[in-house]
Amino acid sequence: MEEVCEGKDFSFPHQEEKILEHWNSIKAFETQLSRTKDCPEYIFYDGPPFATGLPHYGHILAGTIKDIVTRYHSMMGYHVTRRFGWDCHGLPVENEIDRHLGIKRRDDVFKLGIDKYNEACRSIVTRYVEEWEQVITRTGRWIDFKNDYKTMDLKFMESVWWVFAQLFDKGLVYKGFKAMVMPYSTGCKTPLSNFEAGQNYKDVPDPEIMVAFPIVGDPDKASFVAWTTTPWTLPSNLALCVNANLTYVKVRNRYTGKIFVVAESRLSSLPSEKPKTKVANGPAGDSKKSKGSSSKKGQEGESAGATENNESFEKLDETFSGASLVGMKYEPLFNYFMEFSDVAFRVIADNYVTSDSGTGIVHCAPAFGEDDYRVCIENQVISKGENLIVAVDDDGCFTGKITDFSGSYVKDADKDIIEAVKRKCHLLSENFLADRNGSGCLTCTQLVELVLLPSFRQKAGLLSLEALPIPIPFVGDLILLSSTEQFRVGAASLPYSTFILIAVVSFSNVTHVIKSISNCALPFYSPNRFVRVESLKEKLLENNKQTYWVPDYVKEKRFHNWLENARDWAVSRSRFWGTPLPVWISEDGEEVIVMDSVEKLEKLAGVEVFDLHRHNIDHITIPSSRGPEFGVLRRVEDVFDCWFESGSMPYAYIHYPFENAELFEKNFPGHFVAEGLDQTRGWFYTLMVLSTALFGKPAFRNLICNGLVLAEDGKKMSKKLKNYPSPVEVINDYGADALRLYLINSPVVRAETLRFKKEGVYGVVKDVFLPWYNAYRFLVQNAKRLEIEGDAPFTPIDLATLQKSSNVLDQWINSATQSLVHFVRQEMDGYRLYTVVPYLLKFLDNLTNIYVRFNRKRLKGRTGEDDCRTALSTLYNVLLTSCKVMAPFTPFFTEVLYQNMRKVCDGSEESIHFCSFPQEEGERDERIEQSVARMMTIIDLARNIRERHNKPLKSPLREMIVVHPDADFLDDIAGKLREYVLEELNVRLLAPCNDTLKYASLCAEPDFSVLGKRLGRSIKDVANKIKAMSQEDILAFERAGEVTIASHCLRQTDIKVVRKFKCPDGMTEKEIDAAGDGDVLVILDLRPDESLFEAGVAREVVNRIQKLRKKVALEPTDVVEVYFESLDEDISVSQQVLNSQEHYIRDAIGSPLLPSTMMPPQAVIIGEESFHGISNLSFKIYLARPALMFNSDAILALYSGNTKFMQGLQVYLLSRDYSNLKSDFQLGKGKITVSCIENQPAVNVVLGEHMFLTVGDYHLRTKSN
């Protein structure tokens, strides 16, 4: 292995870039795919992103999840094809082109030419592909960009045609006006799916008006009163709807004499009026406030002057039921639809009308409302089919049918319509509500506060809310709600009696998007192709049960609820850039052909097809099978909803069924998908719908759903606000691996939100990678030390031999490593990625702070070479195994370590990612793992006692007592683990004790968090009896593991046994103290002992030597000699300490502590420092390079007493390079021949007889002699 730098000099980003170069040089990804091509398939579906923007943290998060899972399964022996995909069609692309080309209306596209428009769309789809590849590759994700799939490719589009044809053949496709409100973009001139509608929409305040509809033939000339916030729908009114079970009443206005019919419970909603009064020099009434105008109070949330007992009106006659009103005719406001007069302009009834708001009478315009359409169909006001008249064109303007307002944009026409109603004397009230925060709309919090006010609900019955633009900070779909639906905001569920638009305003670039989408998204009907999702509902719910989700609550709640309320899916769009519907229809509509392949189209049309976009196939006609007189079939103009294409991805990306049929059919459903929480209503949903419709199966088996990555301030990440660091910046600073682990080890992998903090990524480097690297570096340093010292190069011992090691910490770390393998396999098989990093953190902490720390002597070779090689091999195996385990998570760092470690292991793979995932080898020793864990608890408890009494670890203590009832544990602590505990805590004696009552009193406490839920009201009685348990009762409970109290069987998880320290007689708390964790009790004897003074001084000296080594930047493997000089007048005290503690000091610093008087004149001092007042001693420490020492008498004997020859030999040896001279002695087995000195005879110099390589060697030899 090659030497490695210090952690502070290790650049993670730079090393990652070198690994990228290495992967490219060996074609790592391609090689992995090639090596596994004959292995079982693991099918992964990669949801296609739009390439019209750059990747952000959400993409990196999802990509990291996908990369981890697919790398893991590759290492598990699967062939995992990973192809990147691009979503090329849809409104985001068209919006951008519309802005670029200045397209405002649908006709503008026809003027330009669909061919030019579509080619312009095609030109921008792949604009950022190169940037995507750079960023995604830099994050360490292995995925094939060269063999990617695009939804605009002919093969992909052909498979989409096949999917639609299969649905058509199954009777799951129909054309018509769906009985639901669809959001319709008047800017894009197309209906929107609830998926596409998740973009930003402008808040459009609606007026709140009450309108009178005169009753035909009523003797009192009464009028029905209906309330609406969409005046633009009034010209299309065909019916009024009441609730048959509500009570209605006739009321007369006391001041105007007009008579109205409303629900009795909604009388308060009618506008209050004050009697006209005459004033001097002025007209009747208030000159500043016309009759019917809104008061300030009315503007704040209720109709003008409305009260619970409306004094402006008096009741007439008896009350009557809503059912009695059914069939009554009324005069239409406008005469645009008089052809329907025989069946329209009458009262109908339905339960969707409620008494929560309005007047209890709802005006119905079936072209613009789900319930309106449904009740009009049910009551034969209109006929079901395709002939519903929609008096609004694709641009959101009234058609010529509405003669008075023809060509006007519907929202702009609101005021004109209100004026027209007012001129007809049918307007009771008009009101625009002001906002509460000055912004023109309520905040989400204000909305919740408002609806939770009982006074508000009583007064207005939520009447005003329907008229407010309500921006909700909710990233998801545009939601249109009917009276039968509810929208949950916080703890409040808000019922609505009319259709309203919930605007998604969590984005910062609202103005920009508004311009590109439209002024408004309107709910109205448009002819469409639908997939019958409602008929599949039960099968969808059943298939959902067959899938496995992380986290499961998203599946069980959010997705289940979405499926349960699934509506038929409008899959066609009146647009241009998309996959065209493969539907050809004859002019009379009687003949329909659905293409399921390009071949079929070519055969029927007799033309060659090279592209399936509109401008290349719209001109293709098919002769009628009925004969020439029936003309030709032409393609319908619509294209597919791009979500239909995404949902077809499992089939289309491999061009099924035209290619890869066996691959697909053997491996469907796919094994794994992963995307964000928003895809529960998007991609996950469309995948499930299409696979259920086609094959009766779910599309996937396993799914990970991630949450949203927000800025640090909790807001959406915004380039405009600059409230987040760019991913490239973070990667360049800390590396991709750190970013990957930061994202994976966060709530966002559990479908929760993450507030991204750059400091959090640095924390991963500091807490994970640096300790990991330091353990690896310690291995490399000590392996290299063997070579430096002339021993055989390090070669790891095989695992089978290592598992037989008698060293307890070897046994422990081997077992802990197997537990790591077991845990990660278990969690990865369960797709719980977020549990792995915390476990790894604990493992690395144990590796560095227990195994490496407690084994430094062994790893440095101070317990013998064989023991050293065993310890190094164990550390090597642990690091290698942990690297393989973590390779899917941190592909770069594990590769860095592996590439160096593989150099000492013959036959190793070229990349760690070619290795198999580790298997459990050998049995795990749970007892030793538990004992070591308890040992660390004991050490922590003892440290706490020291800190409380200001006793630093350098001060030795006489004795510690460990109290625990488990004899096996006490045997381990007093036996195998004893030396580690004593050395770490600087204690002389360790006494085990299994008599738990000798030093402690026991008391029992109920665990209320567990028992409270289970016992309910009985908890108080049970808790009192638990607290009253005697010492003997508690001991019996511990032995049995359970106890019955008040007929409840309680186990050890229900009761906490607390051990409280009991100070022995004759001693104070300053002399003895204890600490416990409820399991083990640690007692320390704190009394001073003069016999421990010398040991304490020795630790102080060692501490100063180690600090000086760090000060002069010595590596742990750097060999130096340490000299000690006393600065005290009386040097006897320090001399006594050095003599008595000689072995301890030598073990601690790795060499003898030499008196300064032995320092030879040729010694090179590399560091020195004086210390004063250390245990009342003053001294000076010198660090020097190893220096040669000569036995002059022995050398003189070599030359028969010739002093000149002796000096010549010494000068020659001192001039030699120290490392080379050392190597020569090693090669000569401690002897060299010197024959190169001119005019001197050749002599054999023996190490340890004529000379010594260090002063320390000379000192030890002379002392032993």
Image (cartoon, rainbow, N blue to C red):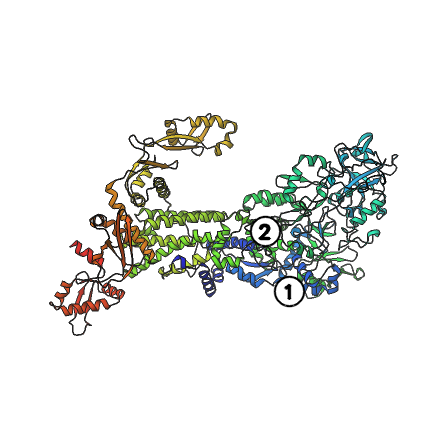
Residue 37 lies left or right of residue 679; in this view the side is left
Which residue is disc 1 drawn over?
Answer: 123
Q: Image point 38% across, 32% down: which residue?
A: 1038
Q: Is residue 428 above or below residue 666?
A: above
Q: In the depicted view, which residue is nearer to us: 1177 or 325?
A: 1177
| Rendered image: mark on residue 703 | none
The total of numbered circles placed on residues is 2
The x, y position of residue 957, in whole percent, is: 29, 41
Instruction: Check whether the beta carbons of the residues at disc 2 and disc 1 lie within 8 A of each other.
Output: no
Of callouts 2 and 1, the N-terminal one: 1
Which quadrant of the figure has residue 559? top right
Q: Is residue 70 visible?
A: yes
Between 887 and 759, the one lying in front of the other is: 759
Left or right: residue 729 versus residue 87 is left
Q: Position of residue 577 (x, y in %)?
A: 68, 60
User: Compared with residue 1032, is residue 356 higher up or lower down, i.e. above or below?
Assistant: below
Mark 2 sits on what residue?
Answer: 716
Indicate the position of residue 43 as horizontal and vertical percent values.
54, 54
Q: Residue furthest bottom?
A: 1239
Residue type (three-letter) at the residue carrying disc 2: Lys
In the visual, does 727 lie left or right of 843? right
**Residue type beneath disc 1:** Ser
Give SS at disc 2: loop
Task: Give the label, 2 or 1, closer to the camera.
Answer: 2
Q: Residues within 10 Å of mark 2 (few under 14, many from 20)?
A: many
Side of 11 where 282 appears, left or right: right
Quarter of the image with the C terminus is bottom left
Mark 1 surroundings within 10 Å by alpha-carbon count, few (fewer than 14), some (14 through 19), many (20 or more): few
Q: Along the line of sight, which residue is nearer the eye, 516 or 167?
A: 516
Kindly report the distance in space between the C-alpha atoms of the residues bearing marks 2 and 1.
30 Å
Can residue 43 be seen from the camera position used here? no
